[in-house]
Image (cartoon, rainbow, N blue to C red):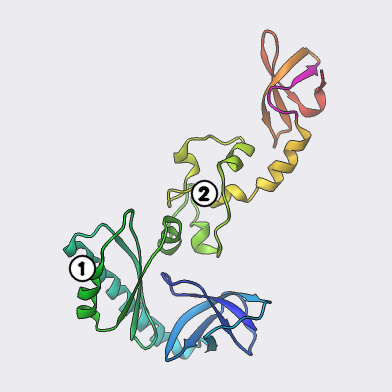
């Protein structure tokens, strides 16, 4: 069986094979060559593929001290890396640092708005950590997923709790839901359109088929008017009449 595995924050997902059965969120130890990594299962993959990663075993209670030590060392490495970046005056931000289980490799994720020459940084890191360093640039959405936070809804970010893949989100989804186009209301902590805009998009697109288009002339009990607004949840349509603007229930209007 092939499983998609997410390593500790900051590393890319990988595909690993196993003869055992695992469930999503199971913590596992994955090996590749001489290196081992701590990760958790995202999902099983039906397609058989070649992969160098193997799920060695599940993480047990006996591994707790090892996991805690690894996380502590990784946190210390992140702090030291940020100090080195500041010393060199580089316009980049270290988001996460993660050691492999043998602590022979250090994986660092970072964000940067512009191209960064980090050759001197790699030299300083090699002198500081004495391990193989791998730097990986990530986008703003990935950074928010790693760091977490509270969204405008008052709940923890979807991407850092249960979303494993970012959905495709467009401004048209906000239009379908009659939401304000103000970017500060539509954007999440990452500065991109909020993932939750995609959750109900299918419902709104289907519901809109029962409503007349904006600008359509319709007949009402008060005369003929033009559609200037709609509320899909309340099943009402806002109509501009000759001398007023009135809301009607969807069943109360007809073709002019």
Question: In the rendered view, does 112 fall on the left or right side of 196?
Answer: left
Find residue 229 and report its image quarter: top right
- Mark number for residue 84? 1
Q: Residue at x 67, y 77 (%)?
A: 47
Distance in Å between CA atoms under marks 1 and 2:
33 Å
Q: Which residues are magenta?
A: 212-220
Which residue is depicted at the point 59% across and 85% down? Answer: 17
| Residue highlighted by disc 2 | 194
Q: Residue furthest left?
A: 87
Q: Is residue 154 above or below residue 50?
A: above
Q: Is residue 227 above or below residue 124?
A: above
Q: Which of label 1 and label 2 is nearer to you? A: 1
Please state, as top left, top right, bottom left or bottom right, where the N terminus lies in the image. bottom right
Along the horizontal axis of the image, is 112 left or right of 236? Answer: left
Quadrant showing the C terminus: top right
Q: Nearer the viewer, residue 24 or 113?
A: 113
Q: Secondary structure at mark 1?
A: helix
User: Could you tell me residue 154's position as x and y percent?
Assistant: 48, 50
Residue 119 located left or right of residue 4: left
Q: Residues within 10 Å of mark 2 (few under 14, many from 20)?
A: many
């Amino acid at each position: 069986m092939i499983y998609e595995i997410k390593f500790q924050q900051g590393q890319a997902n990988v595909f690993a094979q196993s003869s055992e059965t695992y469930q999503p969120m199971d913590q596992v130890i994955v090996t590749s060559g001489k290196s081992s990594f701590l990760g958790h299962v995202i999902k099983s993959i039906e397609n058989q593929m070649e992969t160098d990663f193997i799920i060695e075993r599940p993480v047990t209670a006996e591994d707790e001290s090892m996991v805690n030590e690894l996380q502590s060392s990784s946190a210390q490495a992140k702090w030291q890396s940020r100090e080195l970046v500041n010393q060199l005056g580089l316009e980049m931000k270290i988001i996460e640092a993660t050691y492999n289980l043998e602590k022979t490799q250090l994986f660092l994720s970072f964000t940067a708005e512009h191209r960064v020459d980090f050759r001197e940084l790699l030299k300083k890191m090699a002198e500081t950590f004495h391990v193989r360093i791998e730097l990986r640039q990530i986008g703003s959405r990935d950074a928010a997923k790693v760091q977490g936070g509270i969204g405008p809804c008052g709940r923890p970010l979807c991407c850092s709790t249960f979303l494993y893949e970012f959905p495709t989100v467009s401004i048209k989804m906000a239009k379908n839901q009659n939401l304000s186009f103000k970017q500060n209301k539509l954007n999440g902590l990452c500065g991109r359109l909020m993932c939750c805009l995609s959750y109900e998009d299918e419902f709104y697109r289907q519901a809109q088929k029962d409503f007349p288009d904006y600008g359509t002339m319709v007949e009402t009990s008060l005369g003929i008017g033009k559609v200037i607004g709609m509320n899909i949840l309340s099943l009402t349509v806002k109509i501009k009449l000759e001398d007023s603007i009135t809301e009607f229930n969807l069943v109360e209007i007809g073709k002019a």
